[in-house]
């Protein structure tokens, strides 16, 4: 019976390390894409909120302009005795 010792060339450890690094690199790539997508969505929401704010300002100004164009009501007549 021939027994082999535990002293290998370490090739298995090197392969395991390389595979681990590949897994980490792939995970980092997908996570960076996720965070980039989050930034794009945040920017889109901010732009939409800014547009809504500008529209509200325009509506407010139109209401002020409309109110300014209405003539003041006439003073009530003095009661007769």
Image (cartoon, rainbow, N blue to C red):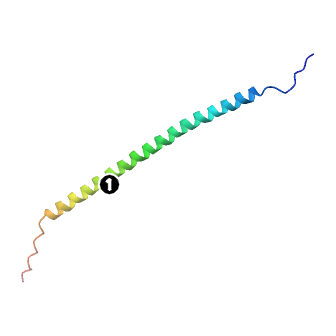
Which residue shows up at 22% across the image and 59% down it? 61
| Left or right position of 61 against 37 | left
Above or below, 56 relative to 76: above
| Left or right position of 68 against 7 | left
Above or below, 54 relative to 3: below
Label 1 Cα neighbours within 10 Å, binned few <14 / some 14-19 / many ≥20? few
Q: Nearer the viewer, residue 40 or 67?
A: 40
The residue at which mark 1 appears reads as 53
Percent position of residue 22, x then y: 62, 31
Which residue shows up at 74% across the image and 30% down it? 13
Percent position of residue 41, x then y: 43, 43
| Left or right position of 69 against 31 | left
Q: Residue furthest left?
A: 80
Q: Residue furthest front?
A: 9
What is the tally of numbered marks visible in this picture? 1
Q: Helix, strand, or loop for circle 1?
A: helix
Q: Quadrant of the C terminus?
A: bottom left
Which residue shows up at 47% across the image and 43% down it? 38
């Amino acid at each position: 019976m021939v027994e082999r010792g535990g002293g290998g060339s370490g090739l298995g450890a090197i392969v395991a390390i390389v595979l681990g690094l590949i897994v980490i690199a792939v995970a980092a790539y997908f996570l960076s894409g996720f965070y980039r997508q989050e930034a794009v969505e945040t920017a889109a929401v901010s732009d939409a909120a800014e547009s809504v704010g500008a529209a509200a300002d325009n509506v407010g100004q139109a209401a002020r302009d409309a109110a300014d164009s209405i003539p003041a009501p006439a003073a009530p007549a003095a009661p007769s005795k």
